[in-house]
Image: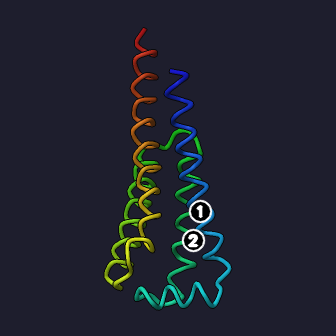
Amino acid sequence: MKTVNIIYWIFTILLVASMLFSAISGFMPTPEGNAMMKHIGFGPHVLPLLSVLKVLGSIALLVPGFARLKEWAYAGFTFDLLGAVYSFIAAGDPPMMWAPILLGFVFIAMSYIFWHKKLKLKAAQSLR
């Protein structure tokens, strides 16, 4: 159980940190950020919305309980990253521009997998 917990928290913290870092840059728009959003086909009004949702999703992952809300947070982060990768590809950007986003999928997958392992171990312990 201890190893599962450690791995879960490592990937969850990496995921939350990456989402919060992204959210902070969305709350403080820069000319470069606005140009990037225009380049991939979005107006600057999308950044604050995504930033708020990333903060709410991060809170959902860090607060104990609320299993259904956590599922939605994982789904939302996945949709966010899928949309970002798709937008960069559709804008004709080379892989070096969007490939780093793929690391976020690793954080999501590992956090999600180990969260479910943690739940199964907790359920098995409560049956004893």
Quadrant including the C terminus: top left
Residue shown at the point (38%, 71%) measured from the top left: 95
- State which quadrant residue 44 falls in: bottom right
Task: Tell me the kind of residue under disc 1.
Answer: Val
**Within 10 Å of the Cα at label 2, are there few (<14), some (14-19), or many (20+) other Cα atoms?**
many
Residue 5, given in percent of the width and then of the height, sits at 54, 29
> Residue 26's mark?
none
With respect to residue 15, does 121 lie above or below?
above
Residue shown at the point (57%, 40%) measured from the top left: 10
> Residue 55's mark?
1
**Residue tagged 2:** 51
How far separated are the C-alphas under marks 1 and 2?
6 Å
Task: Tell me the kind of residue under disc 2.
Answer: Ser
Residue 9, given in percent of the width and then of the height, sits at 57, 38
State the SS at label 2.
helix
Residue 96, given in percent of the width and then of the height, sits at 43, 71
Question: For this rendering, which residue is in front, 104 or 73?
Answer: 104
**Within 10 Å of the Cα at label 1, are there few (<14), some (14-19), or many (20+) other Cα atoms?**
some
Residue shown at the point (58%, 68%) measured from the top left: 22
Question: In the displayed structure, does residue 29 sit left or right of residue 98?
Answer: right
With respect to residue 4, does 105 lie above or below?
below
Residue 114, given in percent of the width and then of the height, sits at 44, 35
Q: Are marks 1 and 2 in contact (CB under 8 Å)?
A: yes
State the SS at label 1.
helix
Q: Residue furthest top?
A: 128
With respect to residue 124, does 73 lie above or below?
below
